[in-house]
Image (cartoon, coloured by chain):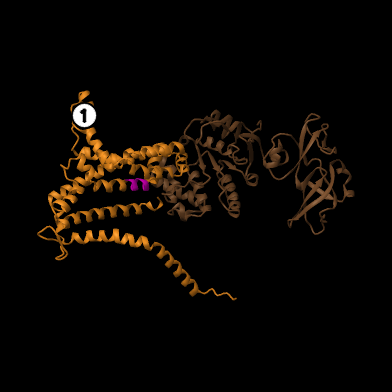
Chain colours: A orange, B brown
């Protein structure tokens, strides 16, 4: 037989290959479209819909009233408070997690694994239960309060304050900061640090110019993983904040279940999603691909 | 090892690097074992040995990336044994180059100057000049991963040299380059070193590279410094079996000392081989393949009678410029390399031959330092 390779044959073969890839991915496509993309889209659609007088949603008379409502002082305060607490939580997590991750990444493999297990252990019990445990710890006659009273600092009254919320959020999300940071530092080429020292940089200069910039993908990934759930947190503000100061999560729940104003609930959810999308894009811009 | 320093000027001079009794242990492992070494100012010095011999650890101790367990390490007379790397007047070209991936080439090269507090414009200017010197003037704005291996190597070189180190340390800098590029870089490094007059301390496991480039070579094995000398000294007068075997190719023939002039080989043949060892000592004779002549059994010239053997050709390989014979003498195979000229006779496998050599080209080493 003679050679039959032609550009046409090659192109057809390429098409066949890409079709095969499509069929392999089809079940996942269908699943994601039905149970992820579609509900997400309906949230966005609802945010532009009209609320009926009975608390239902009418898919007509499209408007942006729900979004203008976000500018009202009450909602604006909630947004501001949620963002502030989420940022504080993220910064505290970063400051706590970075030195720990660095320490972890410089241990020998066996020590690392044991310590990573310790980081994971809290996940073995229910998130709700852990939040209630904090409530007991911080309560009026809880152990923390008894200690501060015992040493003459008076009663501990941080339960049901923003401080308690941040405490709970940091406690809940710290592992999400540690893991990507650890991965970033652990993967770093240590000869770069040696090169920096060799070129006359002090330890501190080396950290500022080499170590930290190179671990930036981990810093950003960890920050996103902490910031996003903190921003939309519902359980922790509800239990440790006592629901007194409403945060975004509580507000969305209220709009859907109590106020029966689905369009506003949907609008707040949409804003949250846009923020998350922005953060994720920032991450990929900053070289997150390599993670 | 008692090697006198080369001193072209003739006057007393301070060694660029002076290592005395330095030992480095990692846990139970002795990486560097009681090494004494002096490296002169302006010298191209190679540290040669197989992997794990301690050459890189020695280099890292000079750089300050490891601290000696024991001993004294001076750079231009100043004790630096426990000084951190940023306070030493040396710079290193790392094996994988260790270029900072998040900085462009210019920022990489100016990094050292910036860390010393030099102002930004001045540093950039000096860095650009150094890049011109290594012929990468046009690459300043590129990121390291946009450069070829050879270019990255030059950037690493520029990044170290721009700080005007008193000693430049190079850790297998050419190991990752392909053969052609490696040979070009060897020449370039050598001429750069001549131009700058700075001591280069060069770690390599490639004996040919060490021979080509260096003024002097230190051969290390198992953490010990075996011999320091010029390429010729190491090649012609190795101190033991290991050095003889590691530098170039050689036939090592076990023997016993008969007297100051003669040794006895395994089959009882007496061979003329001047040596300083007491009679009865176990020794080995190192005989380079290219210093052996080969011919018919009755062809041995009169003056070489005392330095000849007979054997059978078992194999011959034609390399264009030479024939490589494997000649089986009674008890072992020997390698013989002859120039292939149009008139030279090729000895076929199976033919009986005589081999002989000049008595100045054999060299007797003590029977120690086995292995390679």
Magenta segment, principal secondary structure?
Answer: helix
Residue A127 falls in which quadrant of the image?
A: top left
**Can residue A221 be found in the magenta stretch?**
yes
Residue B44 falls in which quadrant of the image?
A: top right
Q: Nearer the viewer, residue A44 or B332?
A: A44
Q: Secondary structure at mark 1?
A: helix
Q: Nearer the viewer, residue B131 or A199?
A: A199
Badge count = 1
Q: Chain of mark 1?
A: A
Q: Residues within 10 Å of mark 1 (few under 14, many from 20)?
A: some
**Quadrant (top left, top right, bottom left, bottom right) of the C terminus of chain B:** top right
Question: Which residue is under mark 1?
Answer: A145
**In the image, residue B86 lies at what x, y percent?**
45, 36
* Left or right placement of residue A58 versus residue B356 in this view: left
* Left or right placement of residue A236 versus residue B351 in this view: left
Residue for point 31% across, 53% down:
A280
**Can residue A47 be found in the magenta stretch?**
no
Which residues fall within the magenta stretch? Answer: A216-222
**Quadrant (top left, top right, bottom left, bottom right) of the N terminus of chain B:** top right
Q: Nearer the viewer, residue B168 or B55?
A: B55
* Left or right placement of residue B88 versus residue A223 in this view: right
**In the image, residue B216 lies at what x, y percent?**
64, 40
Residue for point 34% across, 48% down:
A221
Q: Is residue A287 visible?
A: no
**In the image, residue B198 lies at what x, y percent?**
55, 41
């Amino acid at each position: 037989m003679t050679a039959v390779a032609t550009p046409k044959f090659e192109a057809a073969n390429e098409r066949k290959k890409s079709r095969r890839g499509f069929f392999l991915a089809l079940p996942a496509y269908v699943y994601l479209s039905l149970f992820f993309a579609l509900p997400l889209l309906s949230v966005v659609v609802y945010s532009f819909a009209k609320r009926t007088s009975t608390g239902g949603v009418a898919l007509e008379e499209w408007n942006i009233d729900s979004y203008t409502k976000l500018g009202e002082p009450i909602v604006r305060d909630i947004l501001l408070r949620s963002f502030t607490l989420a940022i504080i939580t993220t910064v505290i997590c970063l400051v706590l997690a970075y030195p720990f991750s660095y320490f972890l990444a410089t241990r020998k493999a066996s020590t690392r694994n044991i310590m990573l297990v310790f980081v994971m252990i809290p996940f073995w019990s229910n998130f709700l239960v852990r939040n209630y445990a904090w409530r007991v710890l911080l309560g009026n006659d809880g152990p923390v309060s008894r200690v501060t009273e015992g040493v003459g600092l008076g009663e501990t009254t941080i339960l049901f304050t923003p401080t308690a919320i941040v405490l709970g959020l940091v406690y809940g999300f710290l592992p999400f900061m540690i893991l990507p940071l650890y991965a970033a530092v652990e993967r770093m080429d240590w000869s770069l640090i040696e090169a920096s020292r060799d070129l006359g940089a002090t330890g501190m200069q080396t950290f500022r110019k080499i170590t930290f910039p190179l671990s930036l993908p981990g810093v950003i990934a960890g920050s996103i993983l902490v910031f996003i759930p903190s921003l939309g947190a519902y359980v922790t503000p509800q239990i440790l904040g006592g629901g007194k100061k409403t945060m975004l999560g509580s507000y969305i729940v209220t709009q859907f279940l109590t106020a029966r104003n689905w369009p506003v609930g949907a609008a707040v959810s949409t804003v949250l999603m846009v923020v998350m999308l922005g953060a994720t894009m920032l991450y990929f811009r900053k070289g997150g691909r390599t993670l | 090892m008692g090697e006198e320093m080369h001193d072209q000027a003739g006057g007393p001079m301070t060694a660029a690097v002076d290592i005395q009794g330095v030992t480095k242990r990692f846990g139970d492992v002795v990486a560097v074992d009681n090494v004494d070494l002096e490296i002169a100012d302006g010298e191209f010095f190679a540290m040669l040995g197989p992997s794990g011999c301690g050459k890189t650890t020695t280099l890292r101790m000079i750089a300050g990336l490891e601290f000696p367990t024991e001993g004294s390490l001076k750079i231009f007379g100043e004790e630096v044994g426990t000084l951190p790397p940023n306070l030493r007047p040396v710079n290193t070209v790392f094996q994988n180059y260790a270029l900072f991936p998040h900085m462009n080439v210019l920022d990489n090269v100016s990094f050292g100057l910036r860390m010393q507090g030099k102002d930004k414009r001045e540093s950039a200017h000096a860095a650009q000049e150094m890049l011109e010197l290594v012929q990468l003037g046009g690459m300043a704005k590129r990121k390291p991963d946009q450069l070829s291996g050879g270019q990255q190597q030059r950037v690493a070189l520029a990044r170290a040299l721009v700080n005007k180190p008193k000693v430049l340390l190079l850790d297998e800098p050419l190991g990752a380059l392909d053969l052609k590029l490696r040979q070009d870089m060897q020449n370039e490094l050598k001429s750069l070193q001549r131009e700058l007059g700075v001591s280069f301390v060069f770690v390599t496991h490639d004996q040919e590279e060490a021979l080509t480039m260096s003024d002097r070579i230190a051969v290390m094995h198992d953490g010990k410094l075996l011999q320091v000398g010029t390429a010729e000294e190491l090649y012609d007068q190795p101190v033991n079996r290991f050095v003889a075997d590691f530098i170039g190719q050689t036939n090592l023939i076990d023997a016993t000392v008969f007297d100051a002039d003669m040794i006895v080989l395994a089959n009882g043949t007496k061979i003329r081989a001047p040596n300083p060892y007491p009679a009865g000592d176990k020794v080995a004779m190192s005989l380079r393949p290219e210093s052996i002549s080969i011919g018919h059994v009755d062809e041995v010239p009169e003056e070489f009678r005392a330095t000849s053997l007979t054997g059978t050709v078992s194999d011959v390989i034609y390399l264009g410029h030479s024939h490589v014979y494997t000649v089986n003498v009674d008890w072992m195979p020997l390698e013989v390399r002859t120039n292939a000229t149009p008139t030279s006779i090729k000895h076929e496998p199976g033919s009986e031959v005589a081999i002989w050599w000049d008595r100045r080209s054999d060299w007797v080493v003590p029977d120690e330092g086995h292995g390679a």
